Amino acid sequence: MPRLITVALALSLLLNGFFVAGFVFRGWIAPVTFEQRMPPPPPGPRPGVLEMVANDVSLDGSQREAMRGVFEQHTQARRDRFREIQKTREQIINEYKRTPIDPEKLAPLIDRLTDLRADQQKETVRALAQLEAKLTPEQRQRLHQVLVDRLSGPPPMQRQPGQPPPRPSQ
């Protein structure tokens, strides 16, 4: 009997050792690449479309200084509109929580949300037009290319006949 217990304890110790070694190997020596987390975004406010485009066209110091008021005005308008969008979204969510769903109450909220988003895009276009007026011809050409690239986005994936459609990303 004592020999059987000794063998069972030795096997248990061996299995536990392999189990711990597997965790150490996967966690520290060779972590799985898809499980590695991305670094957190840098602190501070996220730049808006106008600031990103301005960086892409390489504004010089005098151009940036001339556009500072437009940037600040656009940023403030964007923040205010974003707050309005969030409030409208919360109202829509509250309506969705009620049963039964009332399309008569939701329709004006959805229209309001659509109008706010359209106004935001129109304001961005107005600011881009002001930016374009301050650019050199080379920068204007770059501006138009950047805008086309941003709007067109990545090309859609082509699938072979007989393949199922791609799963939506989460």
Image (tube, rainbow, N blue to C red):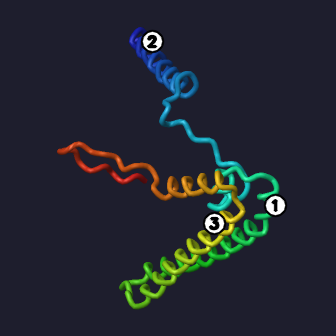
The three-letter code of the residue at mark 1 reads Glu
What residue did someone put label 3 on? 128
Residue 132 picture quarter: bottom right
Residue 155: % across, % down: 40, 49
Give the secondary structure at mark 3: helix
* Residue marked by disc 1: 65
Give the distance between the C-alpha atoms of the residues marked 3 and 1, in whole angstroms.
Answer: 16 Å
Name which of mark 2 and mark 3 comes first in the sequence.
Answer: 2
Q: Where is residue 153 in the image (x, y as percent from the top left)?
A: 46, 53
* Residue 72 placement: quadrant: bottom right
Looking at the image, is 66 positioned above or below residue 17? below
Category of crowding for the residue at label 1, using alpha-carbon neighbours closer than 10 angstroms: few (below 14), some (14–19), many (at least 20): few
| x and y percentages locating residue 114 in the rendered image | 49, 78
Q: Residue 6 carries which label?
A: 2
Against 106, residue 153 (above or below) is above
Amino acid on which disc 3 is placed = Leu
Query: Which quadrant of the figure has residue 46?
Result: bottom right
Q: Earlier in the sequence, mark 1 or mark 2?
A: 2
Q: Cα distance, mark 1 to mark 2?
A: 80 Å
Q: Is mark 2 on a helix, strand or loop?
A: helix
Residue 153 relative to residue 70: left or right: left
Please state if 97 lies on the left or on the right of 30 as rendered: left
